[in-house]
Structure formats: C-alpha cells, structure tokens
Amino acid sequence: MNNSTHPLHVWIFNDASVASLLRADSPLWADFVPGVIVEIAERPTLAHALDLETPPSYPGVAGLLGTAAAPSDLVVRLPAVSIPAILTAAQPLTPATLSAALRKLANDGRIFGPRVILLDAALVPALTSALLSCTKLGIAWDLSIAPGPALPALLGTLATENLLRPETWAGLNAYFSPDHFATDEEHSAALASLNALPTARLLPSLAAS
C-alpha cells in the first residue's frame, strides 16, 4: 500500500454558495487539478446547493476509515467539473472521527492527486489540531451577508493555533454569491474591510447559474 503523504488543500467556507466556486477554472485550485474534493460540514451543504442525492446511510469521509468502502464507493460527480467529490455525511460526525478522516485523507494511496477539503467554518474550533499538517489553508468567504465579528474571530482562532504560517496560508478569497447583486457601495465597503486583513482579495463577480 502507498503510505506517502499527499497534499491537503483546505478551504474554510461559510455558506453553501461556495458551490459556485467549484468549476474547472476555480480560484481554489489555480495551479493544480484536485484528485478529489471533500466536503466536511455540520450538515449536507453541497448536496442541497447542487441538487445531489446521497442515501440516508451515506458515511461521507468517515467511509475512508473502514475497510468496507473504497473511495470509489463514496464519490459523486459535481455538475460543473469532472472531479470526484466526497460529500458531507448524512448524519453528523464527531470531531474525533473527522480528525481521523483528515489524517487518512493525507495518506490514502487509493486516491490520486491533491485533495481539496471544503471545511465548514463552524467546525474549525474543533479541528484546529488536525489542520496543522495541511499543505495549504485558506478561506472562501461569502460577503453577501455582513460577516460581523465571525470573520475576525475565525482569523483570530487560526492565528492562535499557528495556522496562518506564511508557508501554508493560502489567503482569504472573499466573494459575493452569484444571486446577490452587490452594489458599488457594497463592493467598496468589502474592499475597504479586506484591506485590513492578511492576504485578502475580493474575487471578480461570479455569474449566476
């Protein structure tokens, strides 16, 4: 069995609109092609956003921890890309299980190529130790709803856990959901707020599907 470590690119998201970034030219993988996209969230998010169906017993990434399921048994195909994806489990998983699954992702030789993990911001405090070994860590944040204290608090958590290291920090990619027609004033306010944050940028407007 191949026990070598494979790159883990973790993107923390705050809204189901992250599905609009899952396309062939996604800014989340500008210089590589993912071998698999893995969603880790409090509840199924991409499945609802993209109208995908998973069975009630779908284990999500936890299926990698057992011997009964192969990665090919867990993956679905996202509508806009040919990259296989493992979606969030139908039932909530414990932080211990999610941490073990993240470690398994890094050395599972049955999956080829870099792994892109979409991690629900709500789960970050419980999984910080599991993120220390990731290859790259960034944030994909929908500004359609004013972030309030949530975004600074998240950045504070990452800084406290030494997860904003220059060699691994992929930056903050902020955007407006395609169904939110941001005004010029909103764009200006977003740019002004992002200027105060480390390596933050506002993505170009996303076309509504």
Image (tube, grey):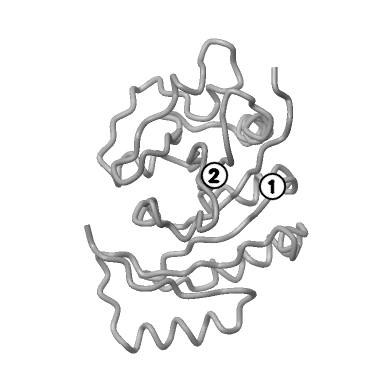
Q: CA distance from mark 2 to mark 1?
A: 10 Å
Q: Which is nearer the eye, 6 or 186?
A: 6
Tell me the crowding category of disc 2: few under 14, some 14 to 19, or many 20 or more residues within 10 angstroms, Cα based: many
Measured from the top left, where is residue 55 in percent x and y?
A: 33, 22
Q: Quadrant of residue 168?
A: bottom right
Contact, CB < 8 Å: mark 2 with mark 1? Answer: yes
Measured from the top left, where is residue 190 in percent x and y?
A: 44, 81
- What's the mark number on residue 193? none
- What's the mark number on residue 134? 1
Measured from the top left, where is residue 99 in percent x and y?
A: 66, 35
At horizontal 47% and vertical 69% (from top left) the residue drawn is 174
At horizontal 51% and vertical 17% (from top left) the residue drawn is 70
**Residue furthest to the top:** 68
Is 155 positioned to the left or the right of 37 in the image? right
At horizontal 28% and vertical 65% (from top left) the residue drawn is 178
The amino acid beneath tag 1 is: Cys
The amino acid beneath tag 2 is: Ile
Q: Which residue is mark 2?
A: 117
